[in-house]
Image: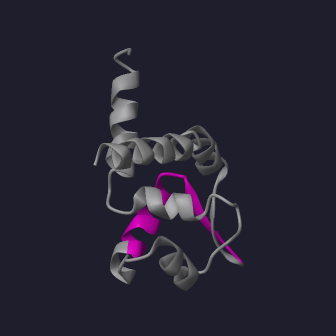
Amino acid sequence: MSAKEAPAISQLFDLLESRYALRVLWALRDEHAQTFRLLQDSVGGITPNTLNTRIKELREAGLLDHGPSGYLVTDSGKDLLKRLSDVQPFAVKWAANRAKKK
């Protein structure tokens, strides 16, 4: 990893490590706009204050936007979610292996 790449990855990971940040993005992966309330229900367990904070951070990062129908991921957000799409099959396989070991 180059000296220029390290800070960029660190900044992205800092954002995504924020509580519920990935869940907010993941809830919008189908590219259908969601109102604040629907997004809160989709994420599950998130308080309105925390959701407001994550929305603000994700909007400032250019990953999320608000349109007439609600919140949507931006083109950058779609690109990130596309790259994260391999996580779901990995997670299913990983959870199954863990369950077998118990």
What residue is drawn where x is 63% and y is 42%?
82
Could you tell whether 61 is left or right of 53 in the image? right
Locate residue 5, reporting x and y percent. 40, 23
Q: Is residue 61 above or below residue 7?
A: below
Residue at image coords 46%, 61%: 23
Q: Quadrant of residue 67?
A: bottom right
Q: Quadrant of the N terminus?
A: top left
- Where residue 10 sits: x, y (%)? 33, 35
Residue with the most extreme left position = 102
The image quarter in which residue 49 lies: bottom left
Across and down, in percent, residue 43 comes to: 47, 71
In magenta stretch: residue 42: no
Closest to the observer, 78 or 59: 78
Residue drawn at (54%, 58%) of the image: 26
Image label count: 0
Q: Residue at x 49, y 64 (%)?
A: 24
* Vertical arrangement, residue 84 with respect to residue 2, above or below: below
Describe the colour scheme in one phrase: one colour
| Segment tinted magenta in the rendering | 51-68
The image quarter containing residue 71 is bottom right
2 vs 89: above or below: above
**Residue 64 colored in magenta in the image:** yes
Residue 65: give x, y in percent of width and height. Answer: 60, 64
Q: Identify the residue at the far top of this view.
A: 2
